Amino acid sequence: MKRLLCQKPLRQPTSYVALTSTKARAASTMSRAFHAAQRQMQTHGYLLQMTSPAKSHHLLPLLHIRQNSSSSSSSKESVFLQEQVRQQSLTDPEAFWMEAQREIDWIEPPTRALEVPDPTKPHKVNWFPGAKLNVSFNALDRHVNSGRKNQVALIYDSPVTNTIQKFTYDELLHRVIRAATMLRNNGVRKGDTVLIYMGMVPEAIVGMLACARLGAVHSVVFGGFASHELVKRIEDCKPKVILASSCGIEGMDKIVAYKPLLDGALDMCTHKPNKVVVLQRPQLFAHLRQDEQSWDDAVERIPEDKLYREYAAVEANEPLYILYTSGTTGVPKGVVRPSGGHAVVLKYTMERMYACKPGQVYWAASDLGWILGHSYICYGPLINGSTTVLYEGKPIGTPDPSAFYRVMAEHKVTTFFTAPTALMILRREDPHGAFRKKFDLSHVKAMFLAGERCPPEIQRWWIRHITGVDDSGKAVHDIQTPVNNVVSDNWWQTETGSPLVGTMIGLSPDGSKLAPIKYGSAGLPVQGVDLRILRIKDKFDEDTEIDAQPEEAEVGEIGNIVVKLPLPPGIMNTLWNDDARFFKTYFRKFPGYYDTGDTGMIDKEGYVHILSRADDIINVAAHRISTSAIEEVVVEHNEIAEACVVARPHPIKGSVPVVLAVCKHHRLDHSADQIQEDIVAAIRQRVGPFTSLYKQNIVFVQRLPKTRSGKVLRKMVRSMIDYIMQSESPLIAPKLCPIPTPATIEEEAVKDEVWFSLCEWATYNPSN
């Protein structure tokens, strides 16, 4: 008898039930054709949702079960260790988090874990109310005081400047004290804001920690952001001091001047900071205006006897930093990170999630301007007492595709973190792992992926070339004992500050106690996260309506990913100066839940599959299809390096998919017609003919437009197609792309390349 392992909806603490086959049959009245298509897609890791399935039981499968590989088929099933931990955190969050907070040094320790001050506002939770701490002290002083003063805290590796610098905890603390003194001399006090516009240099981390030391709130902005984007952030957070660098180095021969961009922003701003302090990089010296200072003059030349060595007591729910989310129009959302809960969760996840112990080396190949840079380049590793790597370079071209392998090997990295896009680039440039074979990576315990959903083929390729294990065609990858060289996806957001879903590699050295890696999945929900999937309703108007009676989706049904309140510690507690927008954006639509804005599903074993943003679902003739389901199949073609799928309007079916494909080595070894035919055939077989992917809707491009963290700018591509389709004729579309340029785009030239390719494509394919 077939049984579905499910969770009763809207219950807390969680209780589990098993549906009988009779109930399971009653739970869905979709057509047999749809079921056949769905089963076929599930076999390959893809899922589909009909637009209007009949109402039935709406249950979530959160019981994560497997059989021990060494036991017989009749052996009892057991819950993963990770799920046991999560259930403890949901059943008794007070006890769970009061135990976790013991790993942080408090000025005034917490007496309780959480409170909801106003029952009518369940989204406003205070974690560790009344407790006080200093995050900078936890990242530096306590390690110096406990015997780690001579341990390396920070490794700055910059192949673009041919520089490697190492700073011990004692040296980094001294630099932070100097920077904090400079900020205080310029009027910065607890609660004031400081904007940091420096790029990937040690002084950026020093500036962040110096702000935290004073109880000031920093806002790190990508180095090289355009002036108009800087204006939005300066006017919103009104910094007392701006820390900048003269330039950034984004390649072996690419220097980007930052200071003129900052000058242009300040000329447009009504708010003026007390001081601008500029790190003069030797690659490009900047002109300083009156009352501006160089970093050397302002920081390095303070006499020792004039240094301010105190640190502020910060209440647990007071802000540590503001991190603005990107947007093409309007004021970016300033996500506010509470200090205490964030510190507790970062310490907890460094060892339990990422398997990095104090004294070991952690490397997140990201930018400090992203949430990953805040959480796991700066604060997480240092709070943990680990060594963090700050890398200024690219996965290729600095100087070749061996860059990542070289850094891992040279610095004895224990845990590595990067974006799937980086792997796609490496797969394109080094498909057979020739550069990988030059380095010993046996010391690497875990490698994590985040930022974009990782297609199974890419993850299998990475595992094959890192570990030598060939998982071609397999759905799961078992974690061996001892746990080593694990390659795992995980999922989280700027708003959350740490993972919501992943594989907690550090919970046990025994691989049989850990959930195996399931390709195409981000893993399982983690501690404190009551994750649910809510049904997508056809008639629901996302802009104007509230779904007062949200329905939980079926097992394997694509829906809106939400987290049931209360949220765990460390997640944002407001938006800067805009509490009303905070509620409207994240909590208004589904009362009682945090709306992540992503879509996905939970499979029968409890694995979470993150498919796309809510607006990246293609509705083809009453079938909802995730763009990622199509992308997975496309990148499995031998000629394709990476792909992006978006919708285009269709007069009969509403919309159909368009594929933008990048060929390996930027060339076609086979005819374009043959590759298009291969892809269409694969999609029909693997996803289904209802996908309606036509050969002429596969467009070859040289590059995909991406953010600096590697996310493909699908919304921008979709806007291009909509604009072209609405033109009277593609032949009269503007020569220059009229779609606004996202502030986070890595290379603006790629936008125009894609625009020209789409205009040419639409000229010859006006209707299908």
Image: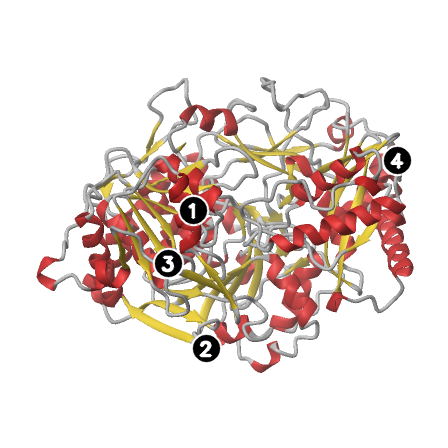
Tell me the SS state at disc 3: strand
Q: Quadrant of residue 400?
A: bottom right
320 or 204, which is in the foreground?
A: 204
Hey, what amino acid is under mark 4?
Ala
Marks 1/2 in contact by CB < 8 Å: the verdict is: no
Can residue 243 be seen at all in this image of the molecule?
yes
Across and down, in percent, residue 523 comes to: 58, 50
Q: CA distance from mark 1 to mark 3?
A: 15 Å
Tell me the SS state at disc 4: helix
Question: In this rendering, would 548 be left or right of 768?
Answer: left
Across and down, in percent, residue 118 comes to: 36, 20
16 or 467, which is in the foreground?
A: 467
For residue 410, the mark is: 2
Can residue 684 be seen at all in this image of the molecule?
no
Q: CA distance from mark 2 to mark 4?
A: 55 Å
Residue occupied by mark 4: 33
Badge 2 density bin: few <14, some 14–19, many ≥20, Cα 10 Å: few
Pick whichever of labels 3 and 4 is earlier in the sequence. Answer: 4
The figure's colour scheme reads: secondary structure
5 or 93, which is in the foreground?
A: 93
Q: CA distance from mark 1 to mark 2?
A: 41 Å
Across and down, in percent, residue 354 comes to: 46, 58
Q: CA distance from mark 4 to mark 1?
A: 60 Å
Question: In this rendering, would 112 be left or right of 741?
Answer: left
Residue occupied by mark 3: 245
Across and down, in percent, residue 605 comes to: 65, 45
